[in-house]
Image (cartoon, rainbow, N blue to C red):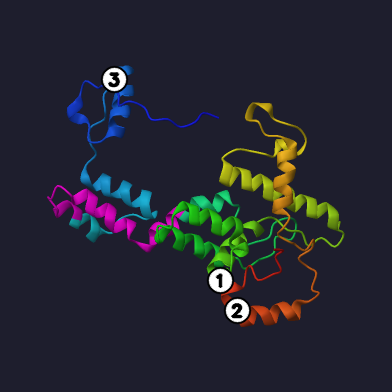
Amino acid sequence: MIAAKKHELPKVKNAAWVRNDIDRFVLARLEHEGMAPSPEADRRTLIRRLSFDLVGLPPTPDEVDAFLADNGRDAYEKVVDRLLGSKHFGERMAVHWLDVVRYADTAGYHSDNHRDVYLYRDWVIDAFNNNMPFRDFAVAQIAGDMMPNPTNDQKIASGHNRLLQTTEEGGGQAKEYTAKYAADRVRNFSVAWLGLTLGCTECHDLELIDSRSASRLSRRATRRTAKHRTRRGDLSGCQQRRERLTACRTDAYTSLPVAH
C-alpha cells in the first residue's frame, strides 16, 4: 500500500500540446518512449466518445449537427455540461457501482428467483445525478438505517448490506448460511470500500497488507448486525411484513428487521 503524494509537474519538449497538468504526465511518458501524441480526433468522433463515456448512449443527429456548427472555444465544454446534466449520466455511472456491490434482480443459487431491490438501484442513480458527496454516499450505504432518525432514503441506501446471494433450499442449515452471508458481506465491504480483498483472511493472515484474521472477524461481527433469514422461503410473519410494506412503500426493500 503506497500512500498518495503530490508529484512535481514533469518537463516536456512539446509544451504547445499541453492543455492541462495531466497532459504533461502523458506527454512526458510519450517523449520518454520516443513517441508523439496522435492527431486530435475530428469533431464527430469527439462527441461520440464523449456521449458514450458520460451517458452510455450515442449522440443524436441533431446533437452532432449542433456541435459541428458551434465554433466557440467552449463548444466541447458545453457538451460536457449538457451530458453531466442528463439523467442518463447517473445511469451510466451507476452501472459500475452496481457491479461492485453485486446488485441483481434475482437472488442467485439454484432457484435464482426474482427479488424487488430496484429502489436501491434508483437511489444510486439519483446519488450520481445529484452529485452526492462521497462521504454521504458511503455512510448512507454502510449504516444509513443506523443513523439518528433515518430517512427512507437512508434506509433504502443501507440495502447495500443485503445485496448478496440468498438460498431457498429446504435443507439449508441456519448457522452455515449465517456464516456464509457474513463472510460475503465482509468480502464485498473490503473490495467496495477498502479497495482490497479480505477473502483470504477467512483462513489466514496476510502480512504483506497487514490484514489479520482477527481484524476480519471484527468486521464480520459488524456485518452480522444485518439480520437475514436463512431461507427466503420462510413465510412466517409475512402478513405483518405485507402490512408494513403497504404502509411505507418507499421503504419496501429495507423495512425487514435490522438490528440496531
Instruction: Provide residue 80's location: percent of width, then percent of height.
Output: 28, 52
Q: Is the magenta stretch mostly helix, strand or loop?
A: helix
The residue pinned by badge 2 equals 248
Q: Is residue 247 visible?
A: yes
Q: Are marks 2 and 1 in contact (CB under 8 Å)?
A: yes
Instruction: Provide residue 146's location: percent of width, then percent of height.
Output: 63, 62
Q: Distance between the residues labelled 3 and 1?
A: 54 Å
Instruction: Inspect the magenta stretch and tell me whether residue 91 lies in it.
Output: yes
Instruction: Inspect the magenta stretch and tell me whether residue 196 lies in it.
Output: no
The residue pinned by badge 1 equals 152
Q: What residue type is labelled 1?
A: Asn
Picture residue at 71% right of the left edge, 77% below the top: 241
Judging from the image, what secondary structure is the residue with disc 2 in?
A: loop
The residue pinned by badge 3 equals 31
Above or below, 235 relative to 1: below
Q: In which quarter of the image is residue 104?
A: bottom right
Judging from the image, what secondary structure is the residue with disc 1 in?
A: helix
Which is nearer the N-term, disc 3 or disc 1?
A: 3
Q: Residue furthest left?
A: 71
Q: Is residue 245 left or right of residue 29?
A: right
Which image quarter is the N terminus in? top right
Q: Do the residues labelled 3 and 1 touch (CB within 8 Å)?
A: no
Which is nearer the N-term, disc 2 or disc 3?
A: 3
Q: Can residue 104 be seen in this view?
A: no
Above or below, 220 relative to 252: above
Judging from the image, what secondary structure is the residue with disc 3 in?
A: helix
Instruction: Bin the neighbour count of mark 1 within 10 Å (Cα to Cα): few under 14, some 14-19, many 20 and up.
Output: some
Q: What residue type is labelled 3?
A: Glu
Magenta part of the chain: 67-93
Above or below, 121 relative to 34: below
Q: Distance between the residues labelled 2 and 3?
A: 61 Å
